[in-house]
Image (spheres, coloured by chain):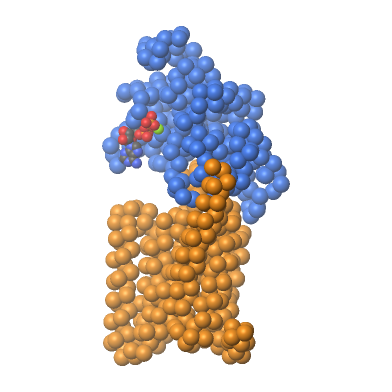
Amino acid sequence: MSLIKCENLSLAYDSAVVAKNINFEISRGDYLCIVGENGSGKSTLIKTILGLKKPHDGQVIFDTDSDACAIGYMPQQTEVQKDFPASVFEVVLSGRLNSCRFRPFFSKNDKITAMHNMRLMGVDSLKNKSFQELSGGQQQRVLLARALCATNTKGLLLLDEPMTGLDPHATADMHKLISDINRRLNITVIMVSHDIHAAVNYSTHILHMVGENPFFGTTDEYRETEQGREFLCAWGCKH
Amino acid sequence: MLIAEAVTSIFSYSFLVRAFVVGTLVSLCASLLGVSLVLKRYSMIGDGLSHVGFSALAVASALSLAPLAVAIPVVLLASFVLLRLDNKKLMGDSAIAVISSAALAIGVLCVSLSGTNTDLESYMFGSIMAISDADAYLSIALSVILLAGYVLFYNRIFAVTFDESFSRATGIRTNFFNTLIAVLTAITVVLGMRMMGALLISSLIIFPCLCARKLCSSFKAVCICSGLISVLCFFVGMVASYVLGTPTGASIVAVNVIALVLSCLVGWGVRNVKGAHQG
Ligand SMILES: Nc1ncnc2c1ncn2[C@@H]1O[C@H](COP(=O)(O)OP(=O)(O)OP(=O)(O)O)[C@@H](O)[C@H]1O
Ligand SMILES: [Mg+2]
């Protein structure tokens, strides 16, 4: 049984179609990488999967017991205001809310999980700092820690260009970390990335948003396709 | 000494005690809601609601109906409308300006047509005499409910204020919480209006949060600090108005303005000291 299935999905803003004929299906534990040019509708697709936006046509079908599945999300650009007073710990902890159900306050366990994820992202020393005073890359890590807090072993992690603004060392670490989370904790990952080589190295499936018929298949299939080879070469032929 | 005397004599009048209790609770509620409204850039909604509330009170008095019984539902309705307007971003803040000035005009016309011109000033600028026993009990009950609700939903309110789309994506009913904040704001505005006046009530919502933001860097600290500042400013303003014989609402706003200036100075000073230490 697939976790998420998109059927003939098309995306539009006020009837201006952005992408169409999106068909894909992923199961629990898969690692889907969405690639494509700027403006090809990747972020829009993520928002549609999350239900933040209605599909123009077609549908997104979740596994029937998916309401038990915790979704972690990292937006490409947060709508967070520049001068919002919030400490790093408060931001990360807010990711635990969906596991609170009807509890009004956070439990000890929630705080431990938040600390653990902050340590994973290397921002535990910034715990009491103000979020708005962090550098772009540090903010990115904090938001990733928050996304990790919102998901669990049966969960789903949607990341929209999580590496933007990270230094090369941190980027490599992050790729390993996400792949680790995916393999060991069996968390399903959907990630938008412009780093096609890392995508090909780590993911199990690729969705290439291009033209009338976006490509979807396993990573190995993608390497063999014409558009795949072209895209990989355009990024410097390492393969 | 003078202040201590003033305070004792204030508490010997039962209507002043009533005003104190209601005022403290309303200031507290307004400042907490203000944190969400200001940070979400919704502070104009408070202003719009107060003008609608003024008009509702004026109509109620012209028709000799119970003021709060008319004003609360009307302002609630207005809060739904204002929130929807903002969501669609059709006209944004100009829509709020249109609604609030239209409401103000209707209210003024109503008061002048019904002939009781003395009420106009009390609605516009507030009067501590205007608070009846029934008003006071209703205010206390609603404020207690509101404070309990705020504490209970505190973490969710933070999440929705901080990042709405993340909250929605992770399954928090953001529409519910936005509506809740609007409803609570509507109630607070109506409760505080009799004392502060329609033109001044929104300052209770905006000033404490602005002060607190200059002084604190975490959300929890901002909430607590703005609550404290708000209650303190209310207290000082009330005593000052009693001693100096100035209008209550305006005195409280004046104290809030002083608090804002002081917070800016303190915030600026602290940052400079920190900078000097680091640099
Ligand atoms: N709020 C919006 N209103 C109208 N059109 C939009 C809106 N957001 C995006 N678009 C349009 O939809 C198209 C797809 O946008 P989207 O953000 O999904 O692209 P993307 O693939 O994520 O690009 P990038 O690689 O730059 O992040 C773009 O052409 C853009 O102009
Ligand atoms: Mg994008």
Residue A125, compared with residue B14, is above or below; it is above
Query: In terms of image quadrants, where is residue A36?
Result: top left
Q: Identify the colour of chain A in the image.
A: blue
Residue B49 as seen in the image, left or right of residue B226:
left
Looking at the image, can residue B66 be seen? no
Q: Residue at x 50, y 26 (%)?
A: A167
> In front: A148, or B11?
B11
Q: Residue at x 38, y 38 (%)?
A: A55
Q: Identify the colour of chain B in the image.
A: orange
Residue A58 as seen in the image, left or right of residue B167:
left
* Residue A225 position within the rendered picture, expressed as x and y whole percent measured from the top left: 40, 11
Residue A38, compared with residue A233, is above or below; it is below
Residue A31, compared with residue B85, is above or below; it is above
* Residue B206 position within the rendered picture, expressed as x and y whole percent measured from the top left: 45, 64
**Where the N terminus of chain A falls, by quadrant?**
top right
> In front: B62, or A172?
A172
* Residue A217 position within the rendered picture, expressed as x and y whole percent measured from the top left: 46, 18
Q: Residue at x 57, y 62 (%)?
A: B225
> In front: A170, or B72?
A170
* Residue B32 position within the rendered picture, expressed as x and y whole percent measured from the top left: 53, 63
* Total tally of numbered discs in the picture: 0
Q: Residue at x 51, y 77 (%)?
A: B237
Q: Quadrant of ligand 1?
A: top left
> In front: B262, or A158?
B262
Looking at the image, can residue A153 be seen? yes
